[in-house]
Amino acid sequence: MTPDRWLSADECAQHLGMTRNGKPNRRGFLERVACLPDFPAPFRVGQHRAWKLAEVDRWAMNQRKVG
């Protein structure tokens, strides 16, 4: 069994294809995706947030089914 992989906001943006000039669009991810009620809740450590890769993938697949 592989351990859970956690993604930062930059990594989530990159993983979801949210880039700008080849760099992750962190602000766009946080303002347009991470705040959605059905997007997975992050794990917080102080001011840092991380999302489980498996949950982000599941959310993305559900978005494809709806769209």
Image (cartoon, rainbow, N blue to C red):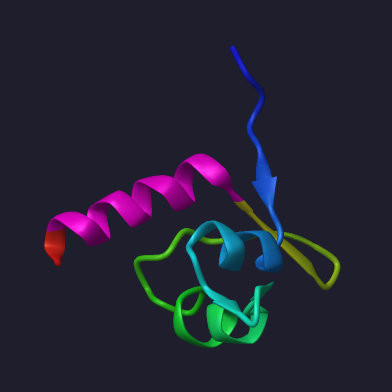
| Frontmost residue, 51 versus 25 | 25
| Frontmost residue, 45 versus 8 | 8
Percent x, y of residue 25: 62, 79
Q: Residue at x 71, y 60 (%)?
A: 8
| Frontmost residue, 1 versus 24 | 24
Percent x, y of residue 64: 22, 58
Q: Residue at x 69, y 67 (%)?
A: 10
**Image side of residue 56 versus residue 60, left or right:** right
- Outermost residue on the top side: it is 1
- Magenta span covers which residues? 52-65
- Outermost residue on the right side: it is 46
* The magenta stretch spans residue 44: no
**Image side of residue 36 versus residue 44, left or right:** left
- Outermost residue on the front side: it is 21
**Image side of residue 60 versus residue 46, left or right:** left
Q: Residue at x 35, y 56 (%)?
A: 60
Q: Main secondary structure of the magenta part?
A: helix
Q: In the rendered image, which quarter contains the N terminus?
A: top right
Give the tally of numbered discs: 0
Q: Is residue 3 above or below residue 27?
A: above
Q: In the rendered image, which quarter contains the C terminus?
A: bottom left
Q: Residue at x 15, y 55 (%)?
A: 65
* The magenta stretch spans residue 60: yes
Percent x, y of residue 29: 55, 77
Q: Is residue 40 above or below residue 21?
A: above
Q: Is residue 3 above or below residue 58?
A: above
